[in-house]
């Protein structure tokens, strides 16, 4: 735990309440049974003589002060003071939950720069309109519930990774329509901001009812259709974008109602899968020592993976410009 030690021997810091239950001691007085967590780990905690029923709940971010004691041979945090975070508090959410190493807003602005350079006015208007409308949600949204890029800002990191790969592929194969491919890459997961339900920490806690029933592929295609109609764009480009979003999971088993039917759609589907796989392999092998195998990874065809130790397993992305 990333606590700061104070001169009086106590320690304090900002934490997430991973668990928060009101219980009664043997003498009948109420206390809080807690698990405190940050990105470094978790520790059980107790707040004795609790009277403020309803003030604290799981997933809240709080500031605590107290002492670390031993109970049954394990560390336990005895809370002397606890309060919800205030708007004036200075803390970094990236210290508490998994978060992108690069700010979502920085990446968002990089995407805007690319869109503004488009020569195709129809694509430019559609993509800009959707991005600007969803900006506040996009910049912090995770890309997944439990799997790849399931972190604050993960959606923007996943998006820029695919965009950068798409730009490099276009240098090799000049017959690719670069602006169409980039448009699909930028928009392919935008409806995840609607599909997910987020916790107070900014991570995904589940799916909305509509998200389960419709999903982000169909909703994303609806975004394009509605935006094109609003802007009065009758071009086939809007239909091509809808198809790219609908088909980017590749096959019906993974949720796509149609398979990719033109080059840019096929490339987007392949890059989406590749980026997710790279993240999952880095994440899994980073948890074992060089020369060791991981447990079987169900998200990767139940394979064990080997950490050869030749490179750093951290998920780094060359953002370019």
Image (spheres, rainbow, N blue to C red):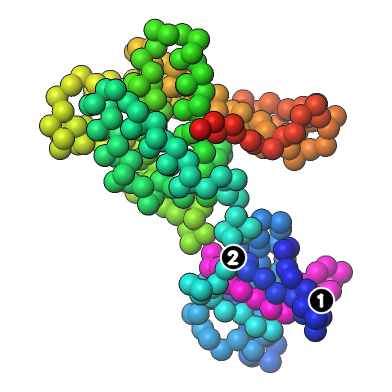
Q: Quadrant of the N terminus?
A: bottom right
Between 189 and 54, the one nearer to me in the picture:
189
Q: Is residue 68 magenta?
A: yes
Q: Residue at x 64, y 58 (%)?
A: 95
Residue 273: x and y in percent read 52, 25
Which mark, by number, is residue 316?
Answer: none
- The answer to whether 25 is drawn above or below residue 63 in the figure is below
Which mark, by number, is residue 69?
Answer: 1
Do labels 1 and 2 touch, CB within 8 Å? no
Q: Is residue 201 magenta?
A: no
The range drawn in magenta is 59-76
Q: Is label 1 or label 2 in front? A: 2
Point out the tag, 1 or 2, that comes first from the N-terminus: 1
Looking at the image, residue 101 sits to the left or right of residue 3; the answer is: left
Give the Cα distance between marks 1 and 2.
25 Å
Q: Residue at x 55, y 40 (%)?
A: 149
Q: Tell me the crowding category of disc 1: few under 14, some 14 to 19, or many 20 or more residues within 10 angstroms, Cα based.
A: few
Q: Is residue 23 visible?
A: no
Between 254 and 263, the one nearer to me in the picture:
263
Give the total of numbered labels.
2
Q: Residue at x 68, y 92 (%)?
A: 27
Which mark, by number, is residue 91?
Answer: 2
């Amino acid at each position: 735990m990333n606590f700061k030690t104070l001169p009086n021997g106590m320690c304090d810091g900002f934490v997430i309440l991973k668990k928060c239950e009101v219980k009664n001691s043997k003498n009948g007085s109420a206390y809080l049974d807690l698990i405190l967590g940050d990105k470094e780990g978790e520790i059980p905690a107790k707040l004795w003589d609790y009277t403020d029923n309803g003030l604290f709940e799981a997933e809240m971010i709080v500031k605590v002060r107290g002492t670390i004691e031993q109970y049954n041979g394990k560390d336990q945090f005895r809370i002397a003071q606890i309060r919800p975070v205030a708007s004036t508090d200075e803390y970094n959410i990236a210290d508490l939950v998994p978060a992108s190493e690069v700010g979502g807003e920085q990446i968002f602005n990089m995407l805007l720069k690319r869109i503004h350079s488009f020569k195709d006015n129809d694509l430019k208007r559609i993509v800009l309109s959707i991005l600007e409308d969803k900006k506040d949600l996009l910049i912090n949204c995770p890309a997944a519930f439990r799997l790849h890029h399931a972190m604050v800002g993960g959606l923007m990191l996943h998006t820029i990774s695919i965009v950068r790969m798409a730009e490099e592929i276009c240098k090799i194969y000049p017959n690719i329509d670069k602006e169409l491919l980039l448009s699909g890459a930028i928009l392919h997961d935008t409806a995840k901001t609607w599909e997910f339900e987020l916790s107070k920490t900014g991570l995904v806690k589940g799916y909305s009812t509509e998200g389960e029933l419709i999903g982000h592929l169909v909703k994303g295609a609806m975004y394009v259709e509605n935006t094109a109609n609003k802007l009065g764009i009758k071009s086939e480009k809007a239909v091509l974008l809808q198809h790219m979003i609908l088909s980017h999971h590749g096959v019906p088993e993974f949720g796509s109602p149609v398979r990719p039917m033109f080059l840019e759609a096929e490339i987007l589907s392949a890059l989406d899968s590749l980026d997710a796989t790279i993240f999952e392999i880095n994440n899994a092998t980073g948890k074992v020592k060089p020369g060791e195998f991981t447990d079987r990874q169900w998200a990767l065809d139940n394979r064990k993976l080997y950490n050869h130790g030749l490179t750093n397993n951290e998920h780094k992305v060359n953002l370019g410009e």
